[in-house]
Image (cartoon, rainbow, N blue to C red):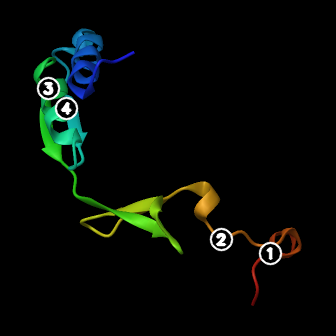
Amino acid sequence: MFIDRNDAARQLADAMTPLRGQRLLVLAIPRGAVPMGRLIAQAPGSDFDVVLVRKLRAPHQPERAIGAVDETGWRCCRAEARPQRPAAAQAAGPIG
């Protein structure tokens, strides 16, 4: 396992050594991942950037993340957080 985040970053960077020379982009999200991302990117000589995202919170459960939205408005939601239609509605196809 890992001693801490820096140890995890170093181990991942070591595992990426065979990729040296390829054009790689390491993206990190703020709140702890930026220092790790920088360490990871340095080892194989990768490009590095930061992606700004906001957590989409579950209704009535603000600590539970159901997805994220980035600075361009692109959203990614967990499958179990998406509204589900009843099976009968799915089988019938679109309305209208």
- Distance from the alpha carbon under mark 3 to that under mark 2: 39 Å
On the image, the x and y values in percent for residue 23 come to: 18, 27
Dot 2 amino acid type:
Pro
List the residue tagged with mark 1: 93
On the image, the x and y values in percent for residue 93 come to: 80, 75
List the residue tagged with mark 2: 83
Q: Residues within 10 Å of mark 1 (few under 14, many from 20)?
A: few
Pair 3/1: label in front = 3
Contact flag, marks 4 and 3 (Cβ < 8 Å)? yes
Q: Which mark is residue 70?
A: none
- Distance from the alpha carbon under mark 3 to that under mark 1: 49 Å
Q: Secondary structure at mark 3?
A: helix
In terms of sequence position, does the residue under pointer 3 or pointer 1 come before the other? 3
Above/below status of 15 relative to 58 = above
In terms of sequence position, does the residue under pointer 2 or pointer 4 come before the other? 4
Q: Residues within 10 Å of mark 3 (few under 14, many from 20)?
A: some
User: In the rendered view, does 82 fall on the left or right side of 95?
Assistant: left
Dot 1 amino acid type:
Gly
Dot 3 amino acid type:
Leu
User: In the rendered view, does 88 fall on the left or right side of 50?
Assistant: right
Q: Identify which residue is drawn at 20% across, 24% down.
A: 6
Front residue of this view, candidates 84 and 65: 65
List the residue tagged with mark 4: 36
